[in-house]
Amino acid sequence: MKIARLFMLVGFVIVLYAGAQVFAQKEDTPVMRGKKLFANYCASCHGADGKGNGPVAPSLKKPLPDLTKIQKGGKFPTDEVRKKVSGDVLSPVHGKKDMPVWGMIFSQTDITNLVKYLESIQRPYDPQPAM
Ligand code: HEC
């Protein structure tokens, strides 16, 4: 059947194209860097998807917030989140600013990337134009 072959060809091209897109996606965007940091430093509590189901979560006294829902009224509170991550806003869990859990490891850029990553996982996801 000619038409079936044509469909197969078109399907094949689509699969190739999609695959190429995945590979073309730059690993080195701020969001991707933030994602890696998150996986290394945050996912143990917050879960790989940020929803609060990390392996350490059950042993914490405080319930974990769903980090995919910190957007308020469609606006992501960048400054607020930044302060919570950097330790400017005290959280006994995250540690204090003068004795931060990860303050020695994270640069300002790291924190910016982390916050950008968090912004990228908000639901409903509003895709930002690629940089
Ligand atoms: C030891 C477990 C633990 C780790 C590790 C951890 N968190 Fe948290 N996080 C919590 C808990 C518990 C809360 C909620 C209670 C609080 O804020 O004190 C929280 C709250 C937050 C909030 C505030 C959410 C809101 O509703 O405003 C943000 C943002 C956040 N975490 C980001 C991070 C990031 C980014 C990392 C990694 C750099 C991280 N957390 C690592 C346990 C953790």
Image: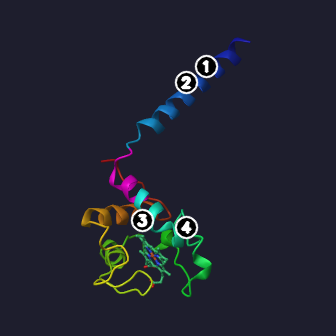
Mark 4 or mark 3: whose residue is earlier in sequence: 4
Callout 4 crowding tier (Cα within 10 Å): few <14, some 14–19, many ≥20: many
Q: Position of 131 compared to 62: left or right?
A: left
Return the residue nearer the eye: 68 or 55.
55
Ligand 1 location (quadrant): bottom left
Mark sitting on residue 9: 1
Label 1–label 2 contact, CB within 8 A: yes
Callout 3 crowding tier (Cα within 10 Å): few <14, some 14–19, many ≥20: many
Q: Secondary structure at mark 2?
A: helix
Q: Secondary structure at mark 3?
A: helix
**CA separation in Å, label 1 and label 2:** 6 Å
Q: Position of 59 compared to 81: left or right?
A: right
Mark sitting on residue 47: 4
Q: Amino acid at mark 4?
A: Gly
Q: Secondary structure at mark 4?
A: loop
Q: Amino acid at mark 2?
A: Val
Q: Amino acid at mark 3?
A: Leu
Callout 2 crowding tier (Cα within 10 Å): few <14, some 14–19, many ≥20: few
Mark 2 or mark 3: whose residue is earlier in sequence: 2
Hey, which quadrant is residue 48 in on the image? bottom right
**CA separation in Å, label 1 and label 4:** 40 Å
**CA separation in Å, label 2 and label 3:** 34 Å
Hey, which quadrant is residue 6 in on the image? top right
The mark total stands at 4
Residue 23 position (above or below residue 126): above
Q: Residue at x 50, y 68 (%)?
A: 68
Mark sitting on residue 13: 2
Mark sitting on residue 40: none
- Per the rendered image, the range of residues in magenta is 27-35
> Which residue occupies the extreme top position in the image?
2
Mark 3 or mark 1: whose residue is earlier in sequence: 1
